[in-house]
Amino acid sequence: MHYSAIQSADDESSGDDDSQPTTTKARRFFGSVDIPAASARMSMGQVADEVIQLLCSDPEATVSVSIEISAEFPEGASDQICRAVSENANALKFTNKEWE
């Protein structure tokens, strides 16, 4: 599992024995990643395990995840693919789904 810690200049003491270190806690996280379609199942699982799970480990955190999919068909998508993808997107409650 990967972990990362970031320390800012605000986290360090000024060197005075009487001063308390000033810390600023991060309040939001935003992230995006491009995932190869061929390894989407494995890569999304890794993102879920190594990032989303950590974010959700704080019971006070509100975490949302969105997935954006883009596919282009130079010769046009077959009716079978269009129908199956549209049905699956409906069943999975996609909020946005569109064919052009």
Image (cartoon, rainbow, N blue to C red):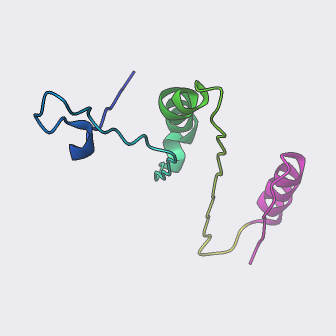
Left or right? Give the position of 63 relative to 92.
left
Q: Residue at x 80, y 55 (%)?
A: 94
Tell me: residue 48, above or below residue 97: above
Q: Nearer the viewer, residue 10 or 73?
A: 10
Tell me: residue 90, above or below residue 73: above
Q: Residue furthest top?
A: 1
Left or right? Give the position of 93 relative to 57.
right
Work out which quarter of the rendered image holds the N terminus and state it.
top left
Work out which quarter of the rendered image holds the C terminus and state it.
bottom right
Expressed as whole percent of the image width and height from the top left, the position of residue 93 reads 85, 50
Q: Residue furthest bottom?
A: 100
Picture mark count: 0
Q: Residue furthest front?
A: 18
Expressed as whole percent of the image width and height from the top left, the position of residue 87 reads 88, 53
Expressed as whole percent of the image width and height from the top left, the position of residue 84 reads 83, 53
Task: Give the magenta part as a residue range.
Answer: 78-100
In the image, residue 56 lies in the stretch drawn in magenta = no
**Where, by quadrant of the figure, is residue 10 drawn?**
top left
Expressed as whole percent of the image width and height from the top left, the position of residue 88 reads 84, 49
Q: Nearer the viewer, residue 97 or 17?
A: 17
Q: Residue at x 78, y 64 (%)?
A: 96
Q: Residue at x 20, y 36 (%)?
A: 12
